[in-house]
Image (cartoon, rainbow, N blue to C red):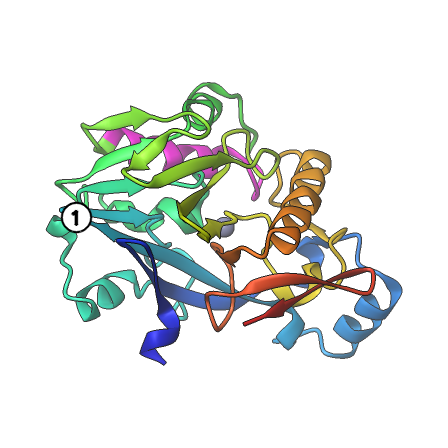
Amino acid sequence: MEDNNKVSIGNVEIIALQDGKLNLPIEVLKNLDENQTKELNSKPEENPLTLSNINAFLIKNGNKNLLIDAGCRDLFGASCGFLMDKLNDNGINADDITDLFFTHLHPDHVGGAITENGEVVFKNATIKISGLEIDFWRDGKFEKVDVNGEDFANLAKSVLNAYDKIETIKDQEAIIPDVHVMSLPGHTPGHSGFRIDNGDNSFIHLGDILHTPRLQLENPDVSLVFDVDMEQGLKTRKMMFDMVSKDKILCSSGHMLEPKFCYIEKSGTGYKLSY
Ligand SMILES: [Zn+2]
């Protein structure tokens, strides 16, 4: 439903743009409990518990069109790569994007920012990103491994090299007016979400603190091999679940399922979504 994909906080409009969906392989999941392991082994392929969406967001405020993450283009197969269609459905073309914020530089968040030839897709956009994130991928030594290795770093560098206008942004600073960065370390060194506040109304984008919402809300210990620092990522996940449930803050994130906008509340030893 179209309306489930849009909310406003004050004058700021937030539109969820789903780039794609996929089921994550069991091998990438760590710290599953006994019941979860049993359920996943009973249906290893396309188990609903391992479903993950890839989401970008369009934030409109005054003359600013801020894109949050850029999807994965064709890097993950036919079930992904629909960001531009979703933007067009909302009356926005690539050239209308004024600012592009990357929560972090993983392929599913930056792949769609360049073409397969390395050309800029959003040619009027200023990139906004944590300086820690740039330093990590530009200067690190990476091995030839599938996750957080040389291929990830090369794509991150290609994206950074393609754009002329790049501004680093620190924790709590404004990306555009009324939209403030929240540092969420662990998943990657500069990994960040953001928050928008207006009086009693708030919204928080939780970045990639959860990839498989159905498993990680029930059991927040579940972590993924994509975390650069899994222990720190776990701390950040628990801290954020605790904060948004206590403060009853509307949330979404880079891998949230439908509906995109929800509240998180305590349930047993874990959490559940409410709407
Ligand atoms: Zn991601």
Q: Pick the quarter of the image with the C terminus.
A: bottom right
Q: Quadrant of residue 54?
A: bottom left
**Amino acid type, mark 1:** Gly
Q: Residue at x 69, y 61 (%)?
A: 217
| 25 with respect to 1 (left or right) | right
Chain part drawn in magenta = 145-161
Q: Locate residue 180 relative to residue 167 in the image: left or right.
A: right
x 27%, y 42%: residue? 100
Disc tally is: 1
Q: If the image is split into quadrants, where does the N terminus sit?
A: bottom left
- Assess whether residue 253 is covered by the magenta stretch: no
Closer to the camera in the image, 63 or 218 = 63
- Relative to 46, does residue 140 appear above or below in the rendering? above
Extreme-front residue of the structure: 199
How far across and down, in percent of the image, does residue 53 sit?
48, 65
**Is the CB–ligand 1 distance for label 1 below 8 Å?**
no
Say which of 245 and 162 sits in front.
245
The relative height of residue 273 versus residue 147 in the rendered view (above or below) is below
- Left-right relation of 157 to 218: left
